[in-house]
Amino acid sequence: MDMNAEHPFTGAGETGALRSDLSNVNVREDLARAGRCANVHLATGRTCLLPLRHHGPCEFHKPQEADDILRG
Ligand SMILES: [Zn+2]
């Protein structure tokens, strides 16, 4: 007997409103080693250049600016 009361719930819907951006974020290891937050916003390709464990939300900057930091 079929009960069509099932709600297929895929936790990671692409358009679903998520509690945080973290699932959309990756970390650049090179920047993380440089002591930066280094979160990469995949949608824009920008990287957070704030210090590791900074307060407040991430500020995403262009990859070019990230390279500048890596070069010192
Ligand atoms: Zn950040």
Image (spheres, rainbow, N blue to C red):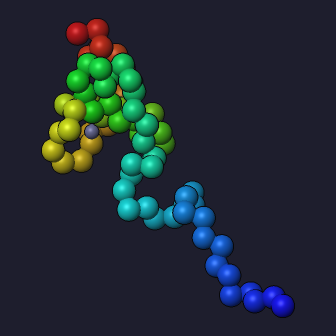
Which residue is at the far top? 71
Q: Is residue 32 shown above or below 67?
A: below
Quadrant of res 64: top left
Q: Residue furthest front?
A: 1
Q: Position of residue 51 (x, y in %)?
A: 19, 31
Left or right: 17 in relation to 31 = right
**Quarter holding residue 33:** top left
Indicate the quadrant of ligand 1 in the picture. top left
Residue 3, compared with residue 26, is above or below; it is below
Image position of 58 with respect to 30: above or below: below
Direction right: furthest residue: 1
Residue 37 relative to residue 39: left or right? left
- Residue 66 at least partly seen: no
Q: Total number of numbered labels?
A: 0
Q: Position of residue 67 (x, y in %)?
A: 34, 16
Residue toward you, 64 or 72: 72
Q: Residue visible at 27% across and 42% down?
A: 58
| Quarter of the image with the N terminus in it | bottom right
- Is residue 6 positioned above or below 23 on the image? below
Residue name at image x 17 percent, y 39 percent: 54
Residue 53 left/right relative to 16: left
Residue 60, horizontal then vertical, whole percent:
32, 37
The quadrant of the rendering that contains the C terminus is: top left
Question: For the point 39% across and 51% down, which residue is it?
Answer: 21
Residue sitting at 43 percent across and 37 percent down?
Answer: 26
Is residue 72 in view? yes
Q: Position of residue 36 (x, y in %)?
A: 25, 27
